[in-house]
Image: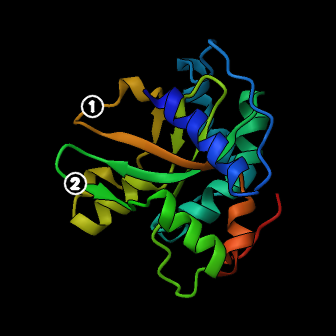
Amino acid sequence: MYESKFLDALERTTRFGLSTPNVELSDARFLTEEALSRLPIAICDIMGELNEEDVVAQCLSLHMRLKPVIEQILDCSAFYTIGWVSFENSEMFKQTEESMSEMLKKGITGSDVNIHAWLTLPSLEILDFSLPTTYAKANGIEEGIGGAITMHPSDLTGGMVYQPMLVGEEFLSKSGAMRFFATYSI
């Protein structure tokens, strides 16, 4: 299911006139137990200790900064993916093709950017370092703070579904969303 939505997002990205990364899907899994055990230490070594302010509602900038780090650590491409997340009874950051097109045409004018971003690997595994902490803080759930979603979407539970809409970073600059966060170099 995620594969067809991801491929649709690639096609939509091209149709919107945005550059599309060269994507070659792979059956190999990159998020092995060994890789997942190295990941937090390697991220900390490269980026320093991330605190809640670095993570809560910072998915756009956080995943932009993490992309080269993840590519270095896992030795594979990581595709910046913009979309939304649905659960059994709710939706977060929901967007439609029409709303994304409007953002691109008119620009994002307010600082309340209601879109979500994560990284997708060639294996279609998802890395989302923002949503668990953002959700936990918004709902007063302590045990979610500092969490990350690092798995294949077929392994998600609780009716959670990632809905990719666009692939690549160009939407951020063309829509004006990039002006709401500082760009960091690594």
Nearer to me, 108 or 125: 108
Query: Left or right: where does residue 49 sit relative to residue 18?
Result: left
- Circle 2 crowding by C-alpha within 10 Å: few under 14, some 14–19, many from 20: few
94 vs 184, nearest the viewer: 94
Which residue bears the numbered disc 1? 157
Q: Name the image quarter holding the C terminus.
A: bottom right
Residue 177: % across, % down: 64, 74
In the rendered structure, find residue 115 and report the number of the disc placed on it: none
Residue with the mark numbered 2: 90
Q: Residue at position x 38%, y 49% from top?
A: 85
Q: Is residue 177 visible?
A: no
Provide residue 101's location: percent of width, then percent of height: 58, 66
Mark 2 is on which residue type? Ser
Picture coordinates of residue 65, whole percent (x, y): 71, 57
Say what amino acid the circle numbered 1 marks.
Thr
Viewer-proximal residue, 45 or 160?
160
Earlier-in-chain disc, 2 versus 1 = 2
Q: Could you tell me which residue is drawn at 78 percent across and 41 percent down? A: 21
The answer to which quarter of the image holds residue 43 is top right
Q: Quadrant of the N terminus?
A: top left
Q: Dividing the picture into quarters, in which one does residue 7 lie? A: top right
Pick the residue in front: 145 or 89. Answer: 89
